[in-house]
Amino acid sequence: MLKILGKASSINVRKVLWTCAELNLRFEREDWGTGFRSTQTPEFLSLNPNGLVPVLKDDDLVLWESNSIIRYLASRYDGAHLYPADPIARAPVDQWMDWQATDLNRSWSYVFLRLVRQSEEHQAEDETARSIESWTKHMRILNARLLATNAYVAGKQFSLADIVVGLSVNRWFGTPFEHPHLPAVSEYFDRLSDRPGFATYCRNGLP
């Protein structure tokens, strides 16, 4: 059975849990991270030298980096409907997954740490304003993309890209500042509500 190391509140752990729900995979999860077992112990660092969750254990395979984990799960466990084998169909899925992990995530980091995590190290007004501006810019990019597809991020079919982007949209709505109206994003988020695991791992009250 798959083993997932990481607390269930982590947005990156939730990527893996939601993917397991989509693939109907059984798993065991262990709580690691802030408030639980430390990820800085030799035991954990031997699995992931970065000291971050999640970590996946599948028999002898140990894997870290959430997007790599969900790509692996879809590739191994009959998830071509989430992560196509055809390179042309797969390319936009990878593109939007990488965009979420780099550009989009980087934009919301500061303001999320200030307004949600209440981090004492993230209280600068100018940095907060810049983070909100950047986050809004990227969400407008997403809104334009969803207007174009009128469906999902990578195209007409739900994919792994919607798991990672959907969780970031959930974080957008869950971070308390004045948001511009982005109708395609709102409709997209409602569209995801029919997916297995969405209510449990995405729209579950956790930002």
Image: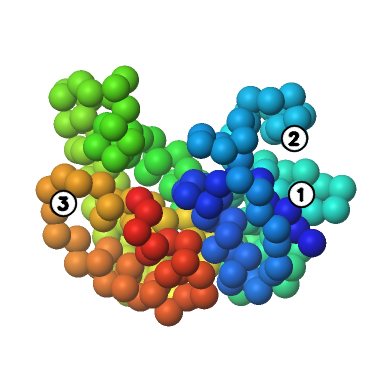
Q: Is residue 29 visible?
A: yes
Pointers 3 and 1 in contact (C-beta within 8 Å):
no
Q: Nearer the viewer, residue 147 or 168?
A: 168
Pointers 2 and 1 in contact (C-beta within 8 Å):
yes
Where is residue 133, by image quadrant? top left
Where is residue 54, by image quadrant? top right
**Badge nearest the viewer, 3 or 1:** 1
Q: CA distance from mark 2 to mark 1?
A: 9 Å
Amino acid type at image mark 2 = Leu
Marked residue nearer the N-terminal end (2 or 3): 2
As drawn, the label of residue 122 is none
Marked residue nearer the N-terminal end (3 or 1): 1
The residue that mark 3 highlights is 179
Amino acid type at image mark 1 = Lys
In x, y percent, where is residue 94? Answer: 55, 54
**Residue closest to the far bottom:** 194
Q: CA distance from mark 2 to mark 3?
A: 39 Å
Residue located 69% across and 69% down the image: 25
As drawn, the label of residue 47 is 2
User: Is 99 displayed left or right of 118 in the figure?
Assistant: right
Q: Secondary structure at mark 2?
A: loop
Amino acid type at image mark 3 = His
| Mark 2 closeness class: few <14, some 14–19, many ≥20 residues within 10 Å | some
Marked residue nearer the N-terminal end (2 or 1): 2
| Mark 1 closeness class: few <14, some 14–19, many ≥20 residues within 10 Å | some
The residue that mark 1 highlights is 57
Residue located 73% across and 53% down the image: 3
Measured along the vertical axis of the image, is residue 1 above or below residue 118? below
